[in-house]
């Protein structure tokens, strides 16, 4: 087969450059570091030639052993290795025993997969998981998300989930699958742990903590809608935790399904090379099966529920030409990210099935590529080939790079790599909490060592020693008792008091793992129980806070009201409804409150003296410095900071923490609207103290007074949260929908018109989005764009046909309009006592 076109020319150009540039040598696969090559200098310059590179790669038993022990991804770059190579000054670091994977560990981990199913709302995640469980034999029958039999999908175990047809909590399960490997055609049995995650942005923490502990993921996309707002959020979360993904374009049976447009969106919007590994046989209602482009076979699903997979070597004539084109496109896309396929493309050679399958796996595990599968979960089509792809292309637990911090070393010490060896010291991460029938249920991922029932484990944060009274594996809301669990597995334990993100060890190490990213709440509600407050009210709020880090509760100091904060209206409504159902506590809510913030726009100096004399020892403190605006630090995620530049002991060092505490206390409430202050740095330069009258209290009050005095000179402004809003509605109402967004001060960022529907993406202030659901329904005359199919795993939980749907995601804070700022200032002043106005 002749290869032509710009893709080949680019590879030839890159190849010619690489022949004279030794930095391009893939030293990671060879098992030596960049530093070693640079030291050897010209003696090894010839190693950069591709021919010698290939010969050198054949000499890699040592490098494979190296990869197996360290458990790092086999296709990671040489630069990543160089970064992880301990610097020369760390030679005094404590020597830790090396734990090799035993043959039993290697064999077990090779057939182990930990995956998550993530997507935008209504892409079919839960429906896909239901089919996976049915085909693997974990459930006896298929039930739909919003089924008429009042059973509901297995993974939606909560009553509210089945009523509303959305996934609220992530659910874990496990299954076994006999996969047909594309490289060899042999059948091998794999153990797969699966976590089904919500699609609604309000429950994004569930996706966050699931991806934190998983080794791979299935990114589900709708064949009609393609890449949507929550798809990009999930993509960002996968990149944050370096989770390889395979993509599954679902709903290929829907009218208007266009997988090639979706694949192009994956490349352009998600910015990851992707190519189809299948071609559909038939379109829309006539979807009959798929053509496997790697093994070059036609695959059909037969039987009542598609549980009979029939393979044929004969490719249907109507898709033969398309299949050839898409296989060529697959090879060209792989050639951009894989050296072996690139060399074959340059030499005009067609890769074998084994070479193609291995290249897809290398590139996927190396986070360079995403193979795209096609099918329809609701029509029971092409789910089994997807399972084969999970087993063939996603990484094992030993291929995932996992590190922990040794708390006995300084904060800046290098991270310690963890090895999934059963003989190594135990390291496990609690990633999810749930109130069960038998007490707190803690979901854990074991990264190293073995956990046994009755064993004593140690809480890394508190140092407490706790016993594991019961060890279970979860199947949605069902449990299976087990005696022990090995590294790379996901389990749950009872009776352990901890928080989400805590680390547990066996006491022989002082390792602690980094927790997951927790976004800040964007909306608040005043909450009060109907009638007399009962202990269940506080009990419910305490439990929900512990389970969900994005759900916050505090008491307003002025009004003494209980304020709950979360990621959106639906998020808070669900918790209010759960309080009524699970704790028999009916509550009333106030008007939603937007999470306004205040910030400063210019630098201001301060020189403030705090004096107070009431008889006996008084209070005296003087502070000098300035406050200035501060941008968000990308590494720490913080936009407030305290800097101490005091020299010569003008302020004793034991009073500096009190000054810092005073600064953070002053940020809790701004003087414009009473909201927290962000984007600010305080620099303390000088001061004075009194030998008798100075104290921590005096300096804390001095910094608070100094900040408030300087605050008025900084031209402060009020900030409001800006949301990225995605609206999907019938195409005939495009002008009405865009007009409605413009009325709400929205800025249209992007729009796309398809056959019967259109998508508009806009940036709108959250304060202007209240009541938009009703307006959207009215603007589109209540016409259903399409029925909410029973394959949905998340949608608007109100109606079965809808005039359009919209989703919101927090983007950033921006200054409010001057008129709104004046209104907020006036409203806040009215709440202040007369003495403070």
Image (cartoon, rainbow, N blue to C red):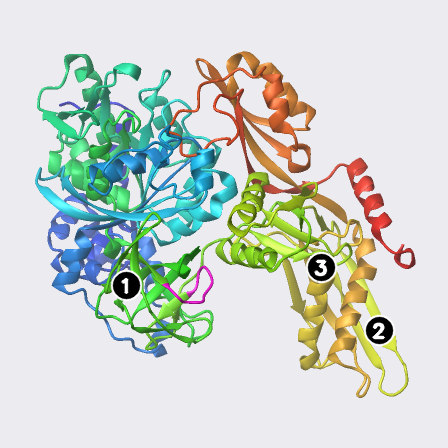
**The quadrant where residue 250 appears:** top left
Question: Which label sits in the foreground, 1 or 2?
Answer: 2
- Where does label 2 land, which residue? 610
The question of residue 102 being in magenta is answered with no
Tell me if I can see residue 19 in this picture.
Answer: no
Residue identified by numbered label 1: 39
Cα separation between marks 1 and 2: 61 Å
Circle 3: element type: helix
Image vertical order of residue 599 relative to residue 468, above or below: above
Query: Which sits earlier in the primary sequence, circle 1 or circle 2?
Result: 1
Q: Say how many tags the image has.
A: 3
Q: Are marks 2 and 3 in contact (CB under 8 Å)?
A: no
- According to the picture, the residue beneath numbered tag 3 turns out to be 667
Q: Quadrant for the C terminus, please.
A: bottom right
Q: Nearer the viewer, residue 657 or 525?
A: 525
Q: Earlier in the sequence, mark 2 or mark 3?
A: 2
Rendered location of residue 181, percent (x, y): 13, 40
Q: CA distance from mark 2 to mark 3?
A: 19 Å
Image quarter of residue 362: top left
Q: Quadrant of the N terminus?
A: top left
Q: Position of residue 325 (x, y in %)?
A: 22, 20
Overall secondary structure of the magenta stretch?
Answer: loop
Q: Is residue 495 magenta?
A: yes
**Real-space CA distance between mark 3 and mark 1, rounded to the nearest whole angstrom:** 52 Å
Please report the bounds of the magenta region as a residue range: 494-502
Image coordinates for residue 654, horizontal then vertical, percent: 67, 81
Taking depth in this image into account, of 594 and 494 the one nearest to the observer is 494
């Amino acid at each position: 087969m002749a290869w032509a076109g710009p893709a080949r020319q680019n590879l030839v150009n890159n190849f010619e450059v690489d022949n004279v540039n030794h930095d391009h040598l893939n030293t990671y696969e060879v098992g030596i570091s960049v530093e070693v090559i640079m030291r050897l200098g010209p003696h090894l310059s010839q190693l950069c030639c591709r021919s010698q590179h290939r010969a050198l790669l054949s000499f890699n038993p040592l490098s494979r052993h190296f990869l197996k022990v360290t458990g790092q991804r086999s296709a990671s770059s040489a630069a990543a290795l160089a970064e992880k190579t301990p610097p020369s000054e760390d030679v005094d670091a404590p020597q830790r025993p090396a734990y090799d994977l035993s043959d039993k560990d290697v064999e077990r981990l090779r057939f182990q997969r930990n995956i998550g199913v993530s997507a935008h709302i209504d892409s079919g995640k839960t429906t896909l998981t239901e089919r996976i469980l049915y085909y693997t034999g974990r459930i006896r029958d298929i039930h739909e998300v919003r089924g008429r039999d009042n059973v509901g999908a297995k993974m939606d175990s909560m009553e509210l989930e089945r009523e509303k047809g959305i996934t609220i909590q992530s659910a874990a399960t496990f299954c076994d699958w006999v996969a047909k490997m594309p490289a060899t055609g042999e059948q091998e049995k794999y153990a797969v742990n699966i976590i089904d995650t919500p699609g609604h942005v309000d429950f994004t923490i569930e996706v966050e903590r699931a991806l934190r502990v998983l080794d791979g993921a299935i990114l589900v996309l709708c064949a009609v809608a393609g890449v949507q707002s929550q798809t990009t959020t999930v993509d960002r979360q996968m990149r944050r935790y370096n989770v390889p993904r395979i993509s599954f374009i679902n709903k290929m049976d829907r009218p208007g399904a266009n997988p090639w447009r979706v694949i192009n969106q994956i490349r352009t919007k998600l910015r990851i090379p992707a190519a189809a590994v299948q071609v559909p046989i038939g379109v829309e209602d006539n979807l009959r099966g798929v053509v496997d482009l790697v093994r070059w076979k036609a695959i059909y699903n037969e039987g009542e529920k598609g549980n009979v997979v029939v393979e044929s070597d004969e490719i249907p004539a109507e898709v033969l030409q398309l299949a050839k084109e898409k296989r060529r496109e697959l090879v060209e896309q792989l050639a951009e990210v894989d050296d072996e396929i690139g060399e074959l493309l340059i030499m005009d050679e067609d890769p074998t099935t084994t070479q193609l399958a291995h290249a897809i796996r290398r590139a996927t595990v190396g986070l360079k590529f995403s193979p795209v599968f096609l099918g329809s979960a609701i029509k029971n089509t092409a789910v089994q080939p997807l399972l084969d792809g999970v087993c063939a292309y996603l990484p094992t637990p030993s291929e995932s790079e996992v590190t922990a911090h040794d708390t006995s070393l300084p904060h800046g010490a290098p991270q310690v790599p963890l090895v999934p060896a059963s003989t190594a010291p135990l390291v496990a991460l609690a990633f999810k909490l749930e109130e069960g029938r038998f007490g707190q249920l803690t979901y854990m991922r074991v990264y190293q060592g073995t956990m046994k029932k009755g064993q004593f484990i140690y809480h890394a944060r508190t140092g407490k020693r706790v016993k594991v009274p019961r060890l279970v594996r979860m199947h949605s809301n069902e449990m299976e008792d087990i005696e022990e669990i090995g590294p790379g597995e996901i389990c749950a334990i009872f009776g352990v008091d901890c928080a989400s993100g805590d680390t547990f060890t066996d006491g022989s190490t002082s390792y602690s793992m980094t927790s997951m990213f927790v976004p800040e709440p964007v909306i608040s509600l005043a909450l009060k129980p109907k009638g007399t407050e009962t202990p269940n009210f506080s009990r419910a709020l305490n439990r929900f806070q512990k389970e969900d880090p994005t759900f916050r509760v505090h008491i307003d100091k002025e009004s003494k009201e209980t304020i709950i904060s979360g990621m959106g209206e639906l998020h808070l409504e669900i918790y209010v409804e759960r309080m009524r159902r699970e704790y028999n506590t009916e509550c009333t809510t106030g008007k939603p409150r937007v999470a306004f913030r205040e910030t400063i726009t210019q630098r201001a100096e301060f020189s403030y003296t705090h004096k107070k004399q009431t008889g006996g020892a008084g209070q005296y403190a003087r502070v000098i410095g300035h406050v200035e605006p501060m941008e968000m630090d990308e590494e720490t995620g913080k936009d407030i900071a305290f800097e101490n530049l005091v020299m010569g002991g003008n302020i004793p060092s034991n009073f500096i923490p009190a000054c810092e505490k005073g600064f953070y206390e002053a940020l809790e409430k701004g003087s414009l609207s009473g909201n927290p202050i962000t984007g600010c740095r305080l620099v303390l330069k000088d001061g004075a103290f009194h030998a008798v009258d100075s104290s921590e209290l005096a300096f804390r009050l001095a910094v608070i007074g100094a900040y408030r005095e300087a605050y008025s000179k900084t031209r402060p402004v009020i900030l409001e949260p800006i949301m990225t809003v995605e609206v999907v509605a019938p195409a005939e109402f495009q002008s009405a929908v865009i007009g409605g967004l413009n009325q709400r001060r929205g800025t249209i960022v992007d729009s796309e018109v398809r056959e019967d529907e259109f998508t508009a993406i806009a940036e709108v202030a959250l304060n202007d989005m209240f009541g938009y659901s009703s307006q959207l329904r009215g603007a589109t005359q209540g016409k259903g764009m399409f029925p909410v199919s029973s394959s949905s795993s998340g949608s608007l939980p109100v109606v079965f046909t809808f005039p359009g749907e919209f989703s919101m995601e927090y983007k950033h804070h921006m200054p409010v309009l001057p008129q709104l700022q004046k209104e907020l200032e006036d409203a806040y002043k009215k709440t202040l006592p007369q003495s403070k106005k």
